[in-house]
Amino acid sequence: MSLPRDQLWLPWRRPPLCLCSARSRVCTGSPSHDAFVLRSRRRMTIPSRHIVAQGEHLSKIAKRHGFSDYRTIWNHPQNADVREKRQNPNVLFPGDVLFIPDKELRIEARATDERHRFVVKRTALKLRLVVEDLYETPVRNAPCELVIEGEVTRHITDGKGLVEQEILPDAHDGWLVLRGEETPFRDTLIPVKIGDLDPEDTTSGQLARLNNLGYLPGDGTDPDAFRSAVEEFQCDHPPLKVDGTCGKKTQEQLKKVHGC
């Protein structure tokens, strides 16, 4: 990005006419009035509800509705049921319903004939990927390229196989390409779908985690493949009962091993 993410500059010069002529500035006196006020109506929007679609996470939804901080929506009392059910604002499920509150902007008074800086505090959104081999050993110190919405960044995996990159809230599609000479995945395009991971208590969420961890249950159309993948995962993580059923304990372990 060409500008620091946490700064918004609003230069201002005295206009030749009364400040009342400016849409977002008001005054109570003549053009020589020595102060101006940035003012917006307190109720900027009508409260609404948002139905989550596939590929959406809360930061993306917040940006769509004009919020710079997803916590304004997430922490609202009317979203308590969703918070309790999902716990992670980045792992929602299609059909979840979120209450979208009003936007209320505060009033800031500043002197005229001066330049004023308004700093917008934003929460950074980061994508974290961990690369492991087929034996769950981290792929360490491997050069790689991460492509998100066409923008390429170059990284080296750390001692835990981690790649981390700050992303925009509406980013969705990407690729990870490992370039290390010693990795078995060299030059393999690993697709990245941001926001597509479903909760661990859903079949789609279980399939995605098992596929990401290399257990290859397929796309869910083959029940035997799914059951076999669950059994293999249970075998690898005692004391889970090996029954091929992805129950509560297996779900919790799957979420823990996967990382979310």
Image (spheres, grey):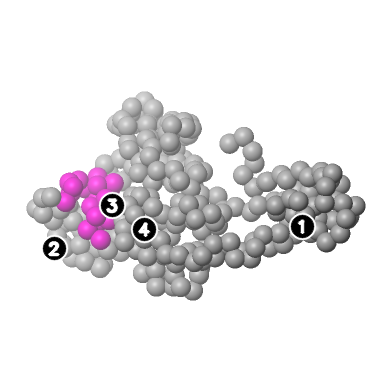
Q: CA distance from mark 3 to mark 2?
A: 18 Å
Marks 3 and 2: which is nearer the front? 3
Q: CA distance from mark 1 to mark 3?
A: 55 Å
Q: Amino acid at mark 1?
A: Val
Q: Amino acid at mark 4?
A: Val
The kind of secondary structure element at disc 2 is loop
The kind of secondary structure element at disc 3 is helix
Question: Magenta residues?
Answer: 202-220
The residue at which mark 2 appears reads as 243
- Mark linked to residue 144: none
Q: Earlier in the sequence, mark 2 or mark 4?
A: 4
The residue at which mark 4 appears reads as 52
The residue at which mark 3 appears reads as 209
Residue pictured at 25% horizontal, 68% vertical: 248
Mark 3: few/some/many CA within 10 Å (<14, 14-19, 20+): many
- Mark linked to residue 26: 1
Quarter of the figure with the C terminus:
bottom left
Q: CA distance from mark 2 to mark 4?
A: 33 Å
Marks 1 and 3: which is nearer the front? 1
Q: Is residue 87 visible?
A: no
Mark 4: few/some/many CA within 10 Å (<14, 14-19, 20+): some
Q: Amino acid at mark 2?
A: Asp
User: Percent x, y for residue 73?
Assistant: 50, 64
